[in-house]
Image (cartoon, rainbow, N blue to C red):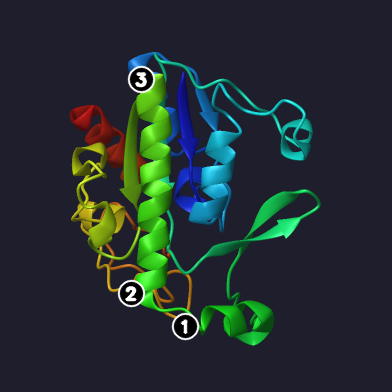
Amino acid sequence: MIYCFGDSWGVGAELNINENPFGYWLARDLGEKFINFSVSGNSYPVIVTQIFDNIRNRNEDSPVSKLVKIRNILKNDIVLVIIPPDIRWMDEYKGGFISWNIGPERTRNKQYVSWARKKTVVWFRYHASLFTYAIQSAFDSIGCKYLFMHNYGGEFIIDHGFKSLINPDNFLDIKKSLTTLLGGKDDYESWNLKSDGPRGQMEKNIYFEGNDTHPNELGHKRIAELIKEKI
């Protein structure tokens, strides 16, 4: 089984209805089944909760387990984890968690902006590293194959407190975002209060042609090839 936890890149945002994201193409090439837990606009802390709801020690009686479809991630599985922009966070909602971000300029989430304004890049970087280490530890205990990949923001910088704990080999490429790996122009700042993703169109090449801020199907097929080479 191949699982994908992520945001709009995992979903396949901007693809046509008859097109598929990279997780589908990887599963097809490897002859595996594919389950996609990605949600557009998803945040890293919410992705952590989704992953822990799908590992073997999950609480069957938790409110989340009763509301969403859950699976057991096992040793023979492959798990793909897309790390979204770290400005996204989470809030509590009806016994579970939802992604929390600043929203479009005209409809800014004032409560979130007020909260985030008091934080620094150090705070976001620390928690992104903490989440990565938690996921790594859980998957290592299971023994499954897994890969982290980040869609925007250049190099994924590990907080100094986690440098000896997080294995960079567990990343598709810790120094390059998916945007960069596809030859796109990645000028998005990992942490800022302007937006939670690129605001303009990507530099056009064969992997982004026809789309604004997400890869086309050819780009998704290329990501699947890169993952196959890595694993």
The residues tagged by marks 1 and 2 sit, at their Cα atoms, a distance apart of 9 Å
Choose the circle earlier in sequence order: 3 or 1.
3
Element marked by disc 1: loop
- The crowd level at tag 3 (other Cα within 10 Å; few <14, some 14-19, many 20+) is some
Q: Which mark is residue 48?
A: none
- Looking at the image, the residue that sits furthest to the front is 161
Q: Which mark is residue 189?
A: 2
Which residue is painted at 36% across and 75% down in the image? 121
Element marked by disc 2: loop
Whether residue 194 sits left or right of residue 154 in the image: it is right
Q: Which mark is residue 143?
A: 3
The residues tagged by marks 3 and 1 sit, at their Cα atoms, a distance apart of 39 Å
In the picture, residue 197 is in which quadrant?
A: bottom left
Rendering coords of residue 180 (x, y %): 23, 58
Element marked by disc 3: loop
Which residue is painted at 68% across and 52% down in the image? 97
Tag 1 near tag 2, CB within 8 Å: yes
Viewer-closest of 90 and 205: 90
